[in-house]
Amino acid sequence: MRRDRKQILRSFEAWLDRVLAEEEPPEGLPSEILARLSTESPHSTEGSCDLYSLWSQMTALVQEVKLQGRSFKQLSDAVAPVADLAPRLVELEREAQTKARREVLEMFLDLRDRMVRGLETARKSLVRLEGLSPRGWRRKMLGRESLRETARETAVALEKGYALSLDRLDEVLHQLEVTEIPCQGRPFDPRYMQAVDLEETNQVPEGTVVEVYRVGYEWKGQTFRLAQVKVSRSAAGPAAGEQESGNASREHDARRPARLM
């Protein structure tokens, strides 16, 4: 009977091993652990530990977790001020970028003003050279035609160079969203203009811009540089106070008795 029992147990173990070998391994378990379990004897004592060893390891693990938590807290306390400064750092970076762009734009606009003045000077020189051109027999006698033609070619080259440079610079300013503020012939607007001179005239309504000394610009819809302009003012007679004073003086003289001769 005991022999039949052992035979039944061996048959059951063989059947169970065959079924487990054909079954798919459970998900999440590494293959090396499964291989080790299949090769080791279920009664093997390798790697076993007693209760004292297990308790010692658990105590050491708890202490290690406490040390790691303390270190993490110290790190958090050290990083907290930097984390609070993060929004301010982003704002400072944005302000620095805006300031740098403004400086570059100011340099571009100053360069454009210089180019405009150079172009105007070149065009005035051409007009002046055309007006000084000798005619008829004077051209041959004076012998200055070659010099005038050389000066004219130089002025034409300068005018062309300034014009091409201005076109390219205007393209760059357009890409940077910089636009010119129109002022000539428009009413004075202190949001975009700065009055640096006045002109008494009755040909245009009072407060009209009659001349632009320096062009103004907008950048991304906001005023970047005020335009310096000359504004018209109505040409009027003496002030009201002066007129009343003069009338009072004349009335006083009329009431004064005549001096005896």
Image (spheres, rainbow, N blue to C red):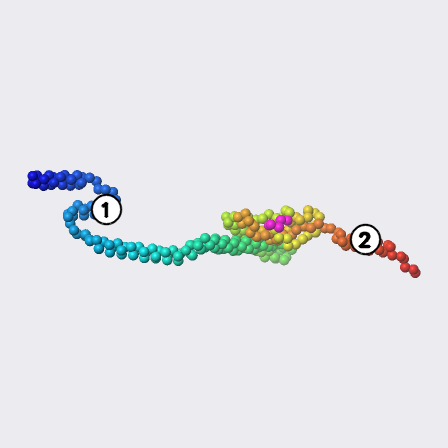
In the image, what residue occupies the spot 24% across and 45% down? 29
**20 or 176: nearer the eye?**
20
Mark 2 Cα-neighbour bin, 10 Å: few <14, some 14–19, many ≥20: few
**90 or 173: nearer the eye?**
90
Q: Is residue 137 visible?
A: no
Instruction: Tell me the chief SS of the magenta region.
Output: loop
**90 or 57: nearer the eye?**
57
In the image, what residue occupies the spot 60% across and 50% down? 191
Residue indicated by mark 1 = 30
Horizontal side of residue 59 vs 252, given as left or right? left
Farthest right residue? 261
Mark 2 against mark 1, which lies toward the viewer? 1
In the image, what residue occupies the spot 68% across and 52% down? 199
In magenta segment, residue 100:
no
- The Cα–Cα distance between marks 2 and 1, rounded to whole angstroms, is 115 Å
Q: Is residue 19 visible?
A: yes
Q: Judging from the image, what secondary structure is the residue with disc 2 in?
A: helix
Q: Name the kind of residue labelled 1 in the image.
A: Pro
Horizontal side of residue 80 vs 209, given as left or right? left
Instruction: Tell how many labels.
Output: 2
Residue indicated by mark 2 = 247
Q: Judging from the image, what secondary structure is the residue with disc 1 in?
A: loop
* Coordinates of residue 143 in the picture (x, y in percent): 61, 57
Q: Along the polypeptide, which appears first: circle 2 or circle 1?
A: 1
Q: Name the kind of residue labelled 2 in the image.
A: Asn
Farthest bottom residue? 261
Residue 61: which numbered mark, if any?
Answer: none
Quarter of the image with the C terminus is bottom right
Residue 64, by quadrant, is bottom left
**53 or 182: nearer the eye?**
53
The stretch in magenta equals 188-192
